[in-house]
Amino acid sequence: MVIYADENFYKKEYLQGKAAVITAAFPYYFRKASQIVKKYVLDNIDDENPPEEVRMCCCEIAELAYKQDQTAQSDGVSSESVQGWSKSYESTESRRNAFDKAVKECVYKWLGGTGLLYRGIR
């Protein structure tokens, strides 16, 4: 399994000094992100030398996956109110749909103009 980005690239190139969203389990999230990117680009990437756009996309998707896992651990609470005591929950399906939409937007943002999403005959 090819992993397009790693912790070093994430911290130095992608974040460029910004605080890291992912604080643990870097290999897990970058492997998951790489699998997602691979699904969109099929075999249009040279696995030995992936373009920077692919690596950036992988970092952003890894952050999305990390945030999704953190939300899932919070029991799906989407909002709370204290004095009138109210608690709202977000369904697992709703969270999954939001994640899928965010991933698709990320892929098209980073890879849309690169030709890597082309599925025709070359």
Image (spheres, helix red, strand yellow):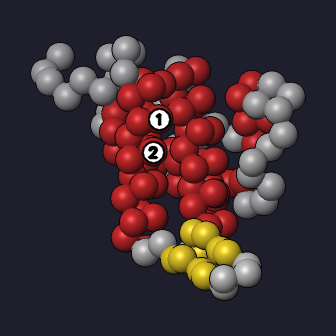
Please state, as top left, top right, bottom left or bottom right, where the C terminus lies in the image. Answer: top left
Which structural element holds mark 1? Answer: helix
Question: Which one is in front, 24 or 64?
Answer: 64
Q: Mark 1 points at which residue?
A: 106
Residue at x 14%, y 24% (from the top left corner): 120
- Quadrant housing residue 91: bottom left
Residue 57 visible in rendering: yes
Which label number is shown at residue 14? none
Residue drawn 73% across and 36% down? 10
Position of 5 relative to 99 (above/below) = above
What is the three-letter code of the residue carrying label 1?
A: Cys
What amino acid does circle 2 point to?
Ala
How many badges with numbers are in the image? Answer: 2
Mark 1 vs mark 2, CA separation in Å: 6 Å
* Residue tagged 2: 102
Q: In this view, does 66 lie above or below 4?
A: below
Q: Do the residues under discs 1 and 2 have CB atoms within 8 angstroms? A: yes
115 relative position to 92: left or right: left
Q: Where is residue 13 in the image (x, y as percent from the top left)?
A: 75, 25
Q: Where is residue 57 in the image (x, y as percent from the top left)?
A: 53, 33
